[in-house]
Image (spheres, rainbow, N blue to C red):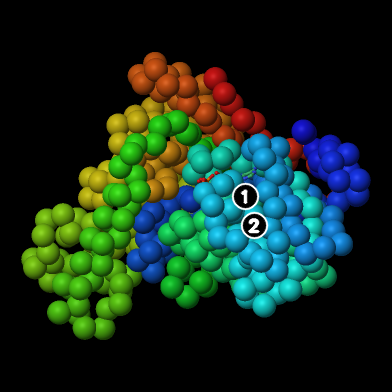
Amino acid sequence: MTNPQELAQAFSEMFGAQPRIFRAPGRVNLIGEHTDYNEGFVMPAAIDYFSFVAIAPREDRTITARSDNFPETAELNLDRPMKGRKHWSDYPLGVAVKLEEAGHRLKGADLLIHGDVPIGSGLSSSAAIEVSTALALLDNAGLSIDRLDLAKICQKAENEYVGIRSGIMDQFIACFGKKDTAVMLDCRSLESTPLPLPEDVKLVACNTMVKHQLASSEYNARREECEEGVRILSKHLPNIKSLRDVSIAELGRFGSDLSDVVYRRCRHVITENDRVLRAATALRNGEVSRFGKLMAQSHQSLRDDYEVSCKELDLMVEFANETPDCIGARMTGGGFGGATINLVNSSKVDEFTVHVAKRYADATKIQPEIYVCSAADGADRVLVKDRLPFPACCIRLRP
Ligand code: ADP
Ligand code: MG
């Protein structure tokens, strides 16, 4: 499938009806890692890789969902909602269940999903599916809701129905992404600041293609270490609610009560929040190389203080930094594998991808996947006649 017409065609052959089509983007996070659950700052951008949902109404109160990326049709009776069952369809069906729980009465529908966001690569195909499905289901029922509420309902679907303890960033940026723009998000107030990106840079995600077992247990351990840091520091700083409220000077003054490990975890979060704010200033002032240096510091802090990197991520960053047109490179996501995010001069993006792919494959014997992206708008309806290609304008390089 290469464009919305083909999705509409496949849908009408399957269900005998003309669908309406909705799409939502994946995302990259430029800086601000492991800060979201500490009520801090992140800086995602929606990307021009999308998930698409084609939808047409049914007479009953059943939702059926198919995806051309997964086998098996899934069904949900809106009057007898079942629990998540560890199936790909938990994401779209969970959104239907949570919309109803929030008081939005839906109508039955057939859904056909087509995703161009690489799945499980840290580009948030999950939020793209959730948000595009939510828009489709609401439109099908003749409803519209506030976008922030929509993002929160999608997050709830992922937290409670799928059972993944994730923050609001992915759903937020899938709803509020803006073309050629990164968005700084305050994860406490949910206030956001658009930050136009320089015209001549690409957002390049390099997938290590590894995911070490440790990832989820270590994620939970980091959250607990941050909570322990807050508990101990609050003896001296009674007004703090999270690491967001602690300055680096205060950590220096009162950190002697913390174990070495907890001290370093706190130092990462506190300095990372500061780096996001400074990165925003750098973007506003057009200081791209300053932005790149902050990305490099973020990677070092994640590697040394937060200890969530791994050999493959470090190599990917090292090889990126060998190229003169890489402005900044760092690991992104939870860590222990997954992807790096790189800011690269547009005119040299081919040289960059070829160099990094070759060096990484030689060193690890693993072929990476590299996604060259531009910042894109958030979720929307797609008119079938628009003849947009899938995906809008990017190259997926599989060396
Ligand atoms: P990611 O980093 O891509 O968000 P997740 O593990 O959070 O990785 O989400 C991936 C899951 O989202 C898939 O296993 C599947 O359940 C769902 N999903 C993503 N894209 C699609 C798709 N195109 N069709 C059906 N389900 C999808
Ligand atoms: Mg996800």
SS of the residue under disc 1: loop
Q: Quadrant of the C terminus?
A: top right
Mark on residue 89?
1
Residue 42 shows in the view: no
Picture coordinates of residue 338, whole percent (x, y): 43, 39
* Image quarter for ligand 1: top right
Q: Residue at x 11, y 56 (%)?
A: 260
Residue 259 occupies quadrant: bottom left
| Front in this rendered view, residue 186 or 72 | 72
Mark 2 and mark 1 in contact (Cβ < 8 Å)?
Answer: yes
Q: Split into 4 quadrants, where in the image is the N terminus?
A: top right
Asked if disc 1 is less than 8 Å from ligand 1, the answer is yes
Residue drawn where x is 16% and y is 54% of the image: 261
Q: What amino acid is at disc 2?
A: Leu
Please, which residue is most extreme toward the left here? 256
- Report which residue position mark 2 lands on: 93
Which sits in the foreground, 155 or 275?
155
Q: Nearer the viewer, residue 162 or 181?
A: 162
C-alpha gap between disc 1 and disc 2: 6 Å
Residue 280 lies, with reference to residue 308, above or below; the image says below
Instruction: Please state the horizontal and vertical placement of residue 240, each as a whole percent of the image.
Output: 27, 78
How busy is the neighbourhood of tag 2: few (under 14 within 10 Å), some, or many (20 plus)? many
| Residue 331 in view in this figure | yes
For the point 25% across and 46% down, the residue is 307
